[in-house]
């Protein structure tokens, strides 16, 4: 299918612009990265690689993974600064997650125009609706920042563990 044919099919239903569709897709990709980083952090705290770790995290919802990571960090992270950073970032994930769920699983419609501005709605979903002032681009940007924070934390944790192993060898 050509790019043109794709946009022709999306021009009226659900009535989103190309930019809005772009930010929807961008958000979905970013949330895949967020879940990936959370999963790797769990494996790091359990001191197991992906081969064993996937046996633990496969089939878990993102909510369950967040709860597991929170418990692991609270109980096993000795570096107070790293612990605070992880728990703070997890809170940011939790604050964004309800909109992520509606965004990904909702039925998209466009309401309006209201005062010349259309309102994007994700309707009829068990998790509710997006707030009236929801902005796709801001959500994607905020989600991307959280994904970057999680990636940085994961690399700090790996470096910390590597340093501990080197110290044990000395």
Image: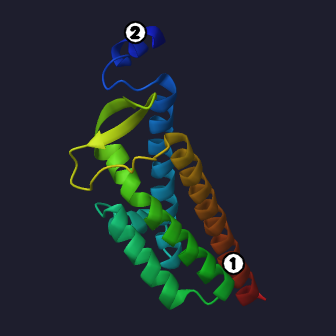
Name above or below for residue 45 compared with residue 52. below
Disc assigned to residue 110: none
What residue sits 46% from the left and 27% below the top?
116
Classify residue 126 as left or right of residue 44.
Answer: left
Residue 14: give x, y in percent of width and height. Answer: 32, 26
Examine the image and state in which quarter residue 15 appears.
top left
Alpha-carbon span between mark 2 and mark 1: 50 Å
Residue 50: give x, y in percent of width and height. Answer: 46, 63
Residue 118: give x, y in percent of width and height. Answer: 42, 31
Examine the image and state in which quarter residue 159 appears.
bottom right
Q: Residue furthest front?
A: 115
What residue sits 39% from the left and 76% below the top?
68
* Near-viewer residue (45 or 145): 145
Q: Quick one: label 2 or label 1, which is nearer the N terminus?
A: 2
Name above or below for residue 8 compared with residue 60. above
Q: Quadrant of the C terminus?
A: bottom right
Q: Residue furthest right?
A: 170
What residue sits 52% from the left and 28% below the top?
19
Residue ID for mark 1: 160
Residue ID for mark 2: 5
Residue 88: give x, y in percent of width and height. Answer: 57, 74
């Amino acid at each position: 299918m050509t790019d043109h044919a794709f946009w022709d099919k999306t021009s009226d239903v659900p009535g989103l612009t190309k930019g809005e569709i772009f930010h929807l897709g961008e958000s979905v990709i970013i949330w895949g990265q967020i879940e990936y980083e959370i999963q790797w952090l769990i494996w790091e705290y359990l001191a197991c690689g992906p081969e064993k770790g996937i046996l633990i995290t496969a089939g878990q919802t993102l909510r369950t993974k967040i709860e597991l990571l929170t418990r692991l960090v609270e109980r096993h992270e000795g570096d107070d600064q790293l612990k605070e950073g992880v728990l703070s970032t997890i809170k940011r994930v939790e604050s964004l997650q309800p909109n992520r769920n509606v965004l990904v699983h909702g039925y998209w419609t466009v309401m309006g125009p209201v005062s010349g501005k259309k309102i994007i709605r994700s309707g009829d979903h068990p998790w509710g609706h997006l707030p009236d002032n929801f902005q796709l681009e801001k959500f994607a940007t905020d989600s991307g920042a959280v994904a970057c924070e999680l990636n940085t934390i994961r690399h700090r944790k790996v470096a910390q563990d590597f340093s501990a192993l080197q110290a044990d060898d000395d």
